[in-house]
Image (cartoon, rainbow, N blue to C red):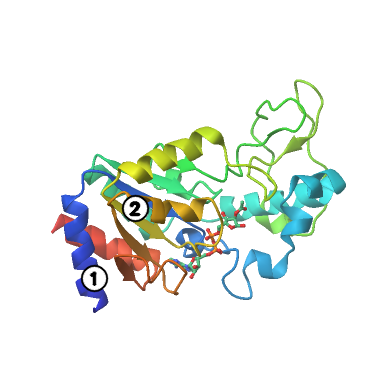
Amino acid sequence: MHINASIHRLARWFEAARQVVVLTGAGMSAESGIPTFRDGADSLWSRFSPQDLATARAYRRDKALVWGWYTWRMAVVRAVQPHAGHRALSELAGLKQGLSIVTQNVDDLHERAGSNDVIHLHGSLFASRCLACGKPSADTDVPPLAAQQPALRLMPPRCAHCGGDIRPGVVWFDESLPEAAWHEACELATQCDLLITIGSSGLVLPAANLPAMAGQHGAKVVEINPARTPLTDQADLSLQGTAGDVLGQLLAMVKA
Ligand code: OAD
């Protein structure tokens, strides 16, 4: 099917649905200039080792390396803006009361585009907390991107309450998802009529189970991604385009 016809079909499903879940991955932020994890030579896991940087073990082994890398990622996010796709999604949510955004992303671009109550399955770069007592840390000092490099070593700040080390507020590979966020995402996936997954490789569990969970409970499952993924053949509709393009066109069709 031609992509325009597919977006038209998605617009009809969107209008008919009572509950819509939008599940976003790193590809949602790609057009803002944030690198994805597994998509080409510039992606994070092609340049850096997750074992050295994205596990609790790695942090305990070398906290200056890990904190420096996350501070660089915070600076990257602070230096970019939401794109037209983030804004289109926020506008679509204004047109459909039962639309929920569940994201694997640790940036705040959905919120900065006006979306509220975003469910962050993998935590947030901007919710650092104490490794020892768990209390949130006050706004983390993020040097400007020009002064940052991914390999800059930086000691984490100390907790104002107990003096423990502050850690990034993201979920690491050897950790579980935040329980409340995961529970809510499962409830939404099993109750929605339409799940749209955008910009995810569908490789990281358990988030990658949500589209199948929705499909098993009767929802239509739609994928927006310029590349094929393990979900492409299982989706009811696959739109091979970028988040910015497809969401912009979808919004225009829903508003027409
Ligand atoms: P990946 O980097 O694995 O996949 C990004 C996907 O986005 C790929 O399928 C691309 O084809 C697609 N993509 C690229 N540009 C796009 C665009 N402009 N519009 C739409 N799609 C585009 O990212 P995730 O699936 O989000 O976890 O990765 C899942 C998790 O793996 C991350 O949350 C992170 C990582 O390890 C943790 O850190 C716990």
Q: Residue furthest bottom?
A: 2
Q: Residue furthest left?
A: 256
Q: Is 35 left or right of 88, judged from the image as shown?
A: right
Q: Residues within 10 Å of mark 1 (few under 14, many from 20)?
A: some
Q: How many dots with numbers?
A: 2
| Labelled disc at residue 6 | 1
Secondary element under disc 1, as helix, strand or loop, is: helix
Label 1, label 2: how many angstroms apart (C-alpha)?
22 Å
Q: Is 174 left or right of 7, judged from the image as shown?
A: right
Amino acid found under the numbered disc labelled 1: Ser
Residue at image coords 34%, 53%: 216
Secondary element under disc 2, as helix, strand or loop, is: helix
Q: Residue furthest front?
A: 216
Pointer 2 residue: 216
**Could you tell me residue 136's position as x and y percent?**
65, 28
**Could you tell me residue 17's position as x and y percent?**
20, 49
Query: Of marks 1 and 2, which one's residue comes earlier in the chain?
Result: 1
Amino acid found under the numbered disc labelled 2: Gln
Q: Can see residue 63?
A: yes
Q: Which marked residue is nearer to the observer: mark 1 or mark 2?
A: 2
